[in-house]
Image (spheres, rainbow, N blue to C red):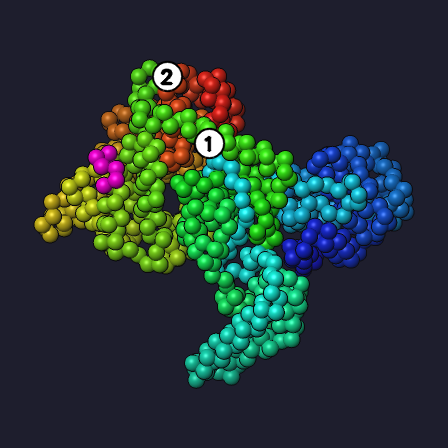
Amino acid sequence: MLDILRSITQEVNAARDLEQALAIIVERVKSGLEVDVCSVYLVDHDSGELVLMASDGLLPESIGYVRLSFEEGLVGLVAQRAEPVNLGNAPDHPRYRYFSETGEEWYHAFLGVPIIHHRQVLGVLVLQQHAEHRYDEDLVTLLVTIAAQLAGAIAHAEASGGINGLNGDKRIERHPLTGKPGAPGVAIGRAVVIHVEADITAVPNRVIEDIAAEQARFLKAVAQVREQIRRMVDNISSSLSAADAALFDAYLLMLDSDSLISATLERIATGNWAPGALRDTLGEHIRVFNDMEDAYLRERADDLRDLGRRLLLQLQPKRQHSTGYPKSTILVGEEITASMLAEVPAKRLVGVVSVRGSSTSHTAILARALGLPAVLGVDELPITRIDGLELIADGYSGRVFINPPVGVKKEFRRLQREEQELTEDLQGLRDQDAITRDGVRISLLANTGLLSDIGPSLNSGAEGVGLYRTEFPFMMRDRFPGEEEQRQVYRQVLEAFAPNPVTMRTLDVGGDKALSYFPIEEDNPFLGWRGIRITLDHPEIFLVQIRAMLKANQGLNNLQLLLPMITTISEVDESLKLIRRAHQELLEEGLDISMPMIGAMVEVPSLIYQIEPLCKRVDFLSVGSNDLTQYLLAVDRNNSRVADLYDSLHPSVLRALQMVVQGAKAHRVPVSVCGEMAGDPAAALMLLALGVNSLSMSASSLLRIKWVLRSFSRRSAKTLLQQALEMDDPKAIRRMLGAALEKKGLGGLIRAGK
């Protein structure tokens, strides 16, 4: 049964469209489970009806025509209850409804299970048989398992091309894909799919005009890989046994295989470029090997994957700096990295769409820093099929429209104009202080990490930098930057904002921030080796960075150091010892270097209960609300399946912040919030009420937050905080705060705030 499930899932994932995927499901489930009928009904989201989309056993003419509501029939009952219905004689049930088009009057046994994806019923998978009997429990649980496994594939296929198979005017139109808001704004442009080098599964389809040239390019890649393997054999043949050397012979045989080469050439002949054709051919061959009973033969699928990577490396296109990207590029990928964004000319890049990530992921933070609308966590994104298509990425609602109709484009153009007008209106606040109605002043700072951020941050009226992410210069290189390289980068930032303070966080990698030259492989990266844990384990990296920062600060004295991912007081003590050591070394070298203020990030819950000893050691605290929320709620902020549970306005997060601020206040230690919570208009009201001294955010959010703070008094914010702390549901808290913003005439910020 598990083999059946694995085989069906693989075939469905490889299907070219939804129609083919459903045909595979009904045929393979019927034959594998030895039943008389297998059918799939899917939900038409426009009408709310269930539509018979595929069947092996019912009359073919009924497919696409049989429709019923959730209140009709046994299929409707399954969808309505969102649980299995197992009947020995279906016609005896009061909800039974007979459709003459199906020819199902001959069938008595009925088993229906819901197909559910992200809590939404997508459809119903049905088994039927002539004989009267209830299906046994093992088969019921197996069908539930199949439906659960196929739900994602069906959702993906539906998103790729709409629900196909309906005739005439009954065809269901495509719906926008839903992800998570990553960075505010609306992007309208052309999709450019970028994939990780040599990742064959992420290769998109791409139409080519010169078929003969593309076939020649593929054959050249084959010849290059063949020559590579022969050189490998020559280099190590003296160290290999005959049995081991046979592995490379197998590679060469695969490369000479007519089925592999010819099938790829045939796919190129249909108009797909070589990498896309190779992807489909390899996928077909790998499925054959995976289905084999012999374990040795199944393992040959890994050899095929390796061979595919080698071929893809030869075929990998190199985009020209500008000509390879359209004027309005929306960068699309499984995961967008800093280096991927850096490859696109800034004037051509208008938005980002990613399969992975969330509003607080590294990709989202980077997009906000660059002022790019972003939608992340789009699970059903048909990444291999949308290269070159027109997209709308709504960074407010988290929706993506593929080939949008004229009316939809017109509406989003209007939203873009409104956004631009609001931005221009807020420019009048640039040189004004963030002072509340009752005279409380809050310092507003910028989050930055790229030198290109400096101009926008200064233009936004930022009073300094509350968080400079030093990992960005590390991520943009293929090795650790040296002391002088780092000093030059840090000096530019410190000079640009002098005499205002610049808080530089020491190297914070791990989790969702990886260095290609310093790989960290972990099962639970957010609970693993990251932040200060890495730099304390590698003092040679930490000391070089601290020396570079201290030297860059010479004569300016506006540097503040921030220690990330602190869990225990001993980590602070060790860090302070190394910082003092670096300072002493520079003094001994004859440099006139001052000791900066040093702070700790509060992002691990354990630190909340160590505020008193912490405040005795540091000069300030900076709350990293992204990680603090993640750890308090046990929600991986990059996992789109649980992203709905992530909300920094959760009562537990508010109470934790209350403890931090009160504890720090007792020791006269200032508290800043530098996570994305600081740039959320609703959350800013809560931070004002809690008594936070400063907020640090992306430059694009700063004027909006200033508008909010200048529109409220701390007293009124405290009243809202008290109401929030009496609530249990973060969504209710957000609605309450949204109403308060609306009442003050700040409704235009609500859309951008979540």
Mark 1 and mark 2 lie on one chain; the one further toward the N terminus is 1
Left or right of 371? Residue 545 is: left
Residue depicted at x 53% and y 76%: 223
Q: Nearer the viewer, residue 527 or 490?
A: 490
Question: Does residue 253 appear in this view?
Answer: yes
Question: Does residue 723 appear in this view?
Answer: no
Q: Which label sits in the foreground, 1 or 2?
A: 1
Kindly identify the amino acid type of the residue bearing the numbered disc 1.
Gln
- Examine the image and state in which quarter residue 32 appears: bottom right
The residue under label 1 is: 420
Left or right of 163? Residue 718 is: left
Secondary structure state at the residue bearing disc 2? loop
Q: Nearer the viewer, residue 94 or 332?
A: 332
Residue depicted at x 23% and y 45%: 491
- The span shown in magenta is 495-500
Left or right of 90? Residue 402 is: left
Left or right of 557? Residue 252 is: right
Residue depicted at x 52% and y 60%: 199
Residue 168 x %, y %: 80, 43
The dot on residue 713 is 2
Residues packed near mark 1 inside 10 Å, few (<14), some (14 to 19) or many (20 plus): few
Magenta stretch holds residue 52: no
Residues packed near mark 2 inside 10 Å, few (<14), some (14 to 19) or many (20 plus): some
In the rendered image, the vertical position of residue 250 relative to residue 49, given as above or below: below
